[in-house]
Amino acid sequence: MTKPGILVDTWAWLEMMSGSPRGDRARDIIRNSSPVSLSVLTLYELRYRLEQIKNREFAIMVIKQIADQTEVIPIDDQIGLLGGTIKIQQISQKTTMGAVDCLILATSRVHDLQILTGDKHFAGCPEAIFL
């Protein structure tokens, strides 16, 4: 049984923009999911990644389109505290999940959303729909 909505990770957005088969699969999953959300941290990652790939104007235009069509979830105290707990677990397991990914994982848990991603840091997480 799947959870009622998805949290789309930066990795999935970039794959969709590249037109890859994984991006096509992500697009199909998004079309069949509700609600579709993203973390404010995904906006942060998209902002600099899209400008690196193309330019500032492109990054701003794409981010506006994405934000207009999804629910952007801010980081609150509950997500921040759970993110810290996840980071401690990651450190004890000697994994390399960074702070942003820990907070995205915490966002998915707090809001009961699955993460649409192909990022290796989420491999093995029960919340991940791994592309």
Image (spheres, helix red, strand yellow):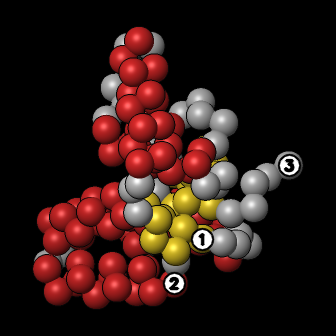
For the residues labelled 2 and 1, say whether their Cβ atoms are less than 8 Å apart. yes
- Whether residue 82 sits left or right of residue 125 in the image: it is left
The residue carrying pointer 2 sits among few (fewer than 14), some (14 to 19) or many (20 or more) residues within 10 Å by Cα, namely: few
Camera sees residue 129? yes
Camera sees residue 24? no
Q: Is residue 14 above or below residue 103?
A: below
Which sits earlier in the primary sequence, circle 2 or circle 1?
1
Image spot of residue 129 (x, y percent): 63, 49
The residue carrying pointer 3 sits among few (fewer than 14), some (14 to 19) or many (20 or more) residues within 10 Å by Cα, namely: few
Q: Is residue 92 above or below residue 75?
A: above
Q: Residue at x 41, y 48 (%)?
A: 77
* Mark pair 3, 2: CA separation: 25 Å
* Mark pair 2, 1: CA separation: 8 Å
Q: Secondary structure at mark 2?
A: helix
Tag on residue 69? 2
Return the residue at label 1: 36
Q: Residue at x 42, y 80 (%)?
A: 67
Q: Secondary structure at mark 3?
A: loop
> What amino acid type is highlighted by mark number 2?
Gln
Return the residue at label 3: 1
